[in-house]
Amino acid sequence: MSDHSTSDHSKSSPLPTYFGVWIALLVGTFLTYEIAKIDLGVFNAAVALIIATTKALLVALFFMHLKGAHEKLLKLVVISTVFFLFLLLVLSMADYGTRLWS
Amino acid sequence: MHDSSTAAVQSNASGEAHAAADNPALLHHFATEEQQRDSASLGMWIFLATEVMFFGGLFCAYLIYRGWYFGDFAAASTSINAALGGANTAVLICSSLTVVLAIWAAQTSQRGLLLAMLALTMLFGCAFLGIKGIEYKDKFDEHHVPGVSFSFHEEIPGHPGQYANPQHAQIFFALYFIMTGLHALHMIIGLGIFAWLFWMAWKGRFTPEYHTPLEIGGLYWHFVDIVWIYLFPLLYLIDRHR
């Protein structure tokens, strides 16, 4: 499916995409649950967060229709949301994570 | 079909050549239906930005305390029923599917399917809250709710004979109840929104040309789903492998 056709609902049916994303999300949930039982050391949290972020991206891109969104103002809002969340988490963790160093 | 002649008269009176003047849902301060839809969507995304920062602060607090009291958090997390949390994740994902199917039904003029999908979405939402209620009841029975009756005597996973600090476990449960509680509150508000959408759909207000409320309500529902996608591994699955 090309990037240009997704914004037009009348041309092709979005149903295969919707059901595909749904199955991918269910598989992701199952994987999250099962992988948590396996000892991966420090990577358990990383794998869980990578799967969660992939699922969140699937929902945002295909269910919330960010893929194929053409309005620049909308992109600005979404990108600045992610940026400020990043700022909040990374600067806070940089502070609390390094307090024991001194 | 609504009274299209009124809209046409208003359009003429305003002296503007509206591209779709026959749509009574097009407000007079928008030039086209597309502009009206984009504006509504943009407004919703700005609201969701504030919601991201709102939940972001809680996630930040969670990450800091998890780093400090990891063993205690793992012990507290392991005491929660992860299967119920996983089932709830699946329930929410199914509800997100029924939301997009509802919008598709509106776009293709399938009134029966639209009503069925909206009803299913509300059913999934209620199932989520019911499962959440069972989970909360377990925590109340076990005295794991922060407060005067709080008590917690569990070993730290992977450290036999070493018990978690109840004070630190209480911080975990405070975050657990605040985050899942606020999420549940969002679900309840979402159910209200979808009950209203169902009523509007019942009255036949949504057409392939105009179904913006469905899309806006859908954005909200999907956002609440995304919050849960992160809450599930972070709250339920800390150090489960030990």
Image (spheres, rainbow, N blue to C red):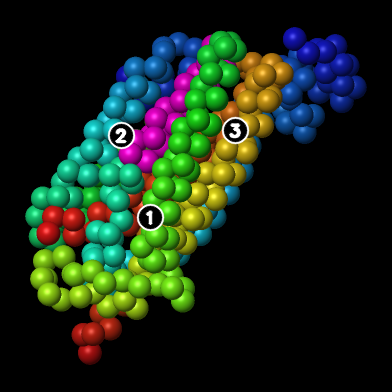
Up/down of B9 relative to B156, above or below = above
Tag of residue B138: 1
- Dividing the picture into quadrants, the one containing residue B127 is top left
Query: Which residue is labeled 3 in the image?
Result: B194
Asked if residue B234 can be seen in this view, the reply is no
**Residue B27 is inside the magenta segment:** no
Cβ–Cβ under 8 Å for marks 1 and 2: no
* Magenta stretch bounds: B87-108
> In the image, which is nearer the foreground, mark 3 or mark 1?
1
Residue extending furthest toward the front: B141
Image coordinates for residue B120, horizontal then vertical, percent: 50, 25
Asked if residue B137 can be seen in this view, the reply is yes
Query: Which residue is labeled 2 in the image?
Result: A25
Task: Check disc 2 and report its element: helix, strand or loop.
Answer: helix
Residue type at numbered disc 3: Phe
Residue drawn at x 23%, y 64% is B74
On the same chain: label 3 and label 2?
A: no
Q: Chain of mark 2?
A: A
In the picture, measured across the screen, residue B242 lies left or right of residue B234, that is left
> In the image, which is nearer the foreground, mark 1 or mark 2?
1
Residue type at numbered disc 2: Leu
Residue type at numbered disc 1: Asp
Assign the magenta stretch its main secondary structure.
helix
Quadrant occupied by the C terminus of chain B = bottom left
Image coordinates for residue B124, horizontal then vertical, percent: 46, 32
Residue B11 or residue B175, whichever sits in front: B175
Is the residue marked by circle 3 packed among few (<14), some (14-19), or many (20+) residues within 10 Å? many
Task: Check disc 3 and report its element: helix, strand or loop.
Answer: helix
